[in-house]
Amino acid sequence: KYEQHGSLSHMRVLVTGGSGLVGRAIQHVVKEEGGAKEGEEWIFLSSKDVDLMKEEETRAVFEKHRPTHVIHLAAMVGGLFKNMTSNLDFWRNNVHINDNVLQAALHVDAVKVVSCLSTCIFPNDTTFPIDESMIHNGPPHHSNFGYAYAKRMIDVHNRACFQQHGRLFTAVIPTNVFGPHDNFSISDGHVLPGLIHKTHNAQKEGTPLTVYGSGAPRRQFIYSLDLARLFLWVLRDYEEVEPIILSVGEEDEVSIKEAAEAVVEALGFKGEVLYDCSKADGQFKKTASNAKLRRYRPDFTFTPFKQALKDTCDWFVANYDSARK
Ligand SMILES: NC(=O)c1ccc[n+]([C@@H]2O[C@H](COP(=O)([O-])OP(=O)(O)OC[C@H]3O[C@@H](n4cnc5c(N)ncnc54)[C@H](OP(=O)(O)O)[C@@H]3O)[C@@H](O)[C@H]2O)c1
């Protein structure tokens, strides 16, 4: 299938964003869970190795490693509050990174690229559950339109690459990801790591925990290690250009209030929990269907939410000094 790079078994996989939440989970699955097969090479890049905003640097790093396969994770990423203030940066930075990476992969004849979209890029005005066919059906939520449109353009790029060059460049669509090595910043990070950090602070300082917003919005959360295991399956066995949603089922959606209560339980916080309704709620829900995933992988078992959350909280407490926050 990829003769130009030698034997069938010799896969050389380049992972952009290899130092982030998802990248570290893939490293774990590849190195600690036997996810790599014999003869495969895995290269994990961070922003210290290359600035993917720069076309020349990106091309040079791809020419150096000449990957047969690429997992493209690198992106400017942030939670609701960072998105609301930086739509221009989210749009431009991500468009540059994605165009540079996909073009460099084409340049070195990589046979497959798996990029990463997100369920928060879907139309705001939609029917539920959301599925893979609906990405371009209307404007995204106003809070993160820069990020959303930049991500949607990956799908445009992939389809054009297939049409013009016959390349299997595809994408996965995870729901909210969480796990060890997340960004636990309260102002810039996503809801779950932010809640974990805030709860830990409240516990240390003996103050109430204040959750931003009403607690009513609903989200599906996927543990980064489950996502990493599914990423490896997509890399090896998923042969569609059309993206695939990687998510727990609709029945596993939880409210922010339920998520906060689960964090409180996992950390053993005994103080008062308040909801600051003057802060934005973001999109009320973005319930995604995992029916396509289930057709391919009816057997896949997700780590139970509370167990994954407990492991994440334990990791944060144990790595408090070095964690991103
Ligand atoms: N987190 C979620 O809930 C979520 C949900 C859906 C989809 N996704 C997608 O999943 C992917 C990975 O996200 P994540 O949560 O793992 O993000 P993350 O923890 O913030 O990691 C981002 C990664 O991108 C790298 N990076 C950023 N800018 C770069 C640049 N200019 N040049 C080179 N590398 C750069 C970072 O390198 P450094 O470590 O060196 O800074 C880091 O490895 C992204 O495409 C994101 O859109 C995430």
Image: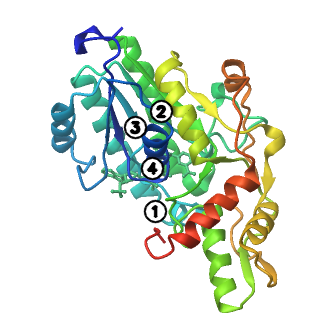
Q: Kindly tell me whether mark 4's CB lies below 8 Å from ligand 1.
A: yes
Residue 156 place in picture, x, y as percent: 45, 27
CA separation in Å, label 4 and label 2: 13 Å
> Label 3: which residue?
72
Nearer the camera: disc 4 or disc 2 = 2
Taking depth in this image into account, of 95 and 227 the one nearest to the observer is 227
Taking depth in this image into account, of 11 and 74 the one nearest to the observer is 11
Proximity of marks 1 and 2: CB atoms separated by less than 8 Å: no
Residue kind at label 1, given as amino acid type: Ser
Residue 17 place in picture, x, y as percent: 38, 47
Residue 289 place in picture, x, y as percent: 74, 32
Nearer the camera: disc 4 or disc 3 = 4
**Picture residue at 57% right of the left edge, 42% below the top:** 118
CA separation in Å, label 1 and label 4: 26 Å
**Picture residue at 63% right of the left edge, 48% below the top:** 223
Q: Kindly tell me whether mark 3's CB lies below 8 Å from ligand 1.
A: yes
CA separation in Å, label 3 and label 1: 22 Å
Query: Which numbered disc covers residue 86?
Result: 1
Colour scheme in the image? rainbow
Secondary structure category for the residue under label 4: helix
Secondary structure category for the residue under label 2: loop
CA separation in Å, label 2 and label 3: 18 Å
Secondary structure category for the residue under label 1: loop
- The tag earlier along the polypeptide, 1 or 2, is 2
> Label 2: which residue?
35
Proximity of marks 4 and 2: CB atoms separated by less than 8 Å: no
Q: Quadrant of residue 314?
A: bottom right
- The tag earlier along the polypeptide, 2 or 3, is 2
